[in-house]
Image (cartoon, grey):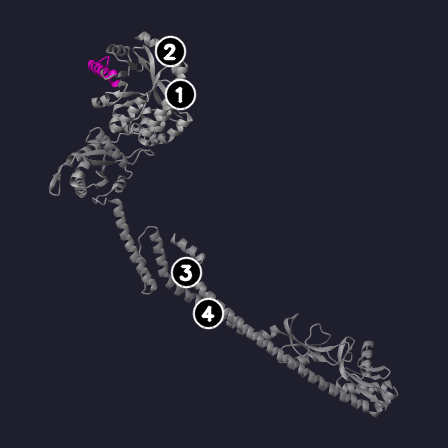
Amino acid sequence: MNLSRQVHRLLTFRNLRTRLTLLYMGLFGLALILSAIAVVTAVTNSARHMVRGEMTSAGAVYGQLWEARSSQLGQSARVLAGDHAFRQAVAANDAPAMRSALDDLRARQGLDGALVLGVDGHATPTGVTLDEAARTALFKGLESGGPESGVLTIGGQPFQVVAAPVDTPAPAGWVVFAERLDAAQMRNLEGLSPIPLSAAVVLNPVQASIGQPITVETGQGLSMQLAHPLPSFDPAAKTFLLLTSPLDRAMKPYESLFLWLAAIGAAGLALLMGGTWVLSRGLTQPITALDEAVHRLQQGEYVEAPVTSTDEIGRLAASFNAMVGDLRDREAKLTHMALHDQETGLPNRLSLERQAGGHTDAWVVLFGVDRFEVVRNAIGYDSMGRLLAVLGARLSALADGAPMARVGAGSLGLVIIARSKAEALEAAEHLAAAAQAPISVNGAPVDIALTAGVAGHGAAGSDLPSPVDRAAIALDQARASRQSAAAFDEVAYGDPAGNLSLISELMTALNNGEVSLAYQPKYDFRAQGVTGVEALMRWTHPRRGAVSPDLFIGMAEETGHIRPLTEWAIRRAIEDQKTLAAAGHVLTVSVNISGRLLSDESFADFAVEEVATSGADLCFEITETAVMGNPEMALRTIDRFADAGISVSLDDYGSGLSSLTYLKRIRADELKIDKSFILGLDDSARDGLLVKSTIDLAHGLGLKVTAEGVETPTALALLRGMGCDMAQGYLIGRPAPMAALLDRLAPAEGAKSAAV
């Protein structure tokens, strides 16, 4: 991993050592390049300057040689032209004599050719033959008084020509000497120059700088040329001596210098690279080590960077190490705080959950201090913290040193290893009993009673809470069943999460028509028929099917959804009562009212207004215990119902702690005896006595009596004999939807009348 990261940094130039080496190599290489450019430029300029000077000198030397040769040839030509015999031969136009004299002089002077040009343009040549163009150009040039020395092109070849007039005594013509300007003569000229150059006589050159060398591109590469003007007998044909010197030949003596400079530069660059690499390595190694330490610290490892020097990097590494030490100490403190209770110093819930882990034989035991709030209020919060610390140490000692954790205000927990639930429960009971000895706090003994809850790990993928949460639930279950210890009961726990989700769906269910009312008939003994029905809520869930009313109504009361649910039931009951009346059945409809709504004045306003507006005949069934929560407010609300013409029925009478005081104060119209007494009428004379006395008491208070849970003809007959007013139960009729109630209402009345 580290190697791959180093390679990646090297390839992407993220490595400091690489960047330093490349930086210094780049700077040094740039300096070498600039130096080389400067040297090459200086040498090239010097070479060009030297070539320019040498070419200028060569042009001047050739000019002097031209003049000297022209003077020499001119002198010979004038001597011959002044010879008496030669003049007579010219005057007599004696060609053989003229050729003989010309050949003799040409041989002595080493000339390529000589001739006599008459004033009539006729030429008598020897050694060279003039073509028509050359003869015409020469004649015009001499006749017009032009130069007596110059260049003449004969047969495409340039010649240096010198002429001298022949007078007899009148002008008779000219003696002309011609010397070929060929390659041999140019090589002689080239040999006079200290630099390599080539010379040629050219006519009308394309590029020429008269008297000044210029740089041009030639077949030999970049070269320097100088055009030296030469006199010509033809004014239209400008003649020049063209000197050319290739610059690469001029630079050849400096090649060894350039090679040495390149070798020195490469060696210097290599030495610099090696030195820089070594220097940067010594500089970056502690930085790399520090960087690696930072990365490992980022991953949670507490490592220190090596301190190898006392400079800035060394001091930085020392500071980093000090910071790592502080972080390690701080994390240890934070971890201790996160895993321990601050009040008692014991491990906390998180620590206990970690101890539980995933071991299948691990069982969480939670010990709850009974009457915790009473004890805490008696000895104070600080003393209670010390008491729990002592109790935790005692339980830990009894459990062979197992760590004890504080889970809640009055709960301590530990993890034990057991092969079965029974073994874990037995160990919990033993520990709870052994730890209940008094604990001395502030010099006074405090009695401690403990209740234990035990829970193990759930099945894989289970939605049950954690073992600690299940142990807390088991503790509550043990206290509810008045046991010293209990294991988690999954059946009794049920599905709170799923049930809680039902409440969020309940309001939607009202709008979607999933909630309905079922009506259970109430049989009137005196009228010998059904005179009323009780509206019971039903919820058919699209996925769960029928949901128990005890479940969703109880949760609706806890979450505050009971009011919209009850308001919907009242409106629905009023509409259904109208449907019954239209079918010829005038019945009183009873609706159950939660005790939580008796202290809600706005609900009372709603109920009174709905009944007054519709003229409905409703009866509100209220449990006696609902009045006990806020009796004054509840009694005022009941009085408002009574004043509005709404009947009030005391439901489930006898199921709780019935109070004659509240029974006397409540303006009720009906008392409903709980079905727990009615179901035992067939077998229990004691239940019959209680029912009979309740009926007599209610009648004495001016209340009608309805018996719930009537399921046998015997019970119905006994109630009739006791003077009960109405009966309700499966014998009379099960709860049914409105349509089913309408279908069987009339036949049911006839059947009950026959039964009575």
- Residue holding disc 3: 16
Q: Earlier in the sequence, mark 3 or mark 4?
A: 3
Is any atom of residue 75 visible in this view?
yes
Q: Residues within 10 Å of mark 4 (few under 14, many from 20)?
A: some
Is 676 colored magenta in this rendering?
yes
CA–CA distance in space, label 2 to label 3: 100 Å
Q: Earlier in the sequence, mark 1 or mark 2?
A: 1
Question: Residue 112 sits in which quadrant?
Answer: bottom right
Q: Earlier in the sequence, mark 2 or mark 3?
A: 3
- Residue holding disc 4: 268
CA–CA distance in space, label 1 to label 2: 20 Å
What label does residue 746 carry, if any?
Answer: 2
CA–CA distance in space, label 4 to label 2: 121 Å
Answer above or below: position of 698 versus 9.
Answer: above
Asked if marks 4 and 1 touch (Cβ < 8 Å), the reply is no
Query: Identity of the amino acid at label 4?
Result: Gly
What label does residue 575 carry, if any?
Answer: 1
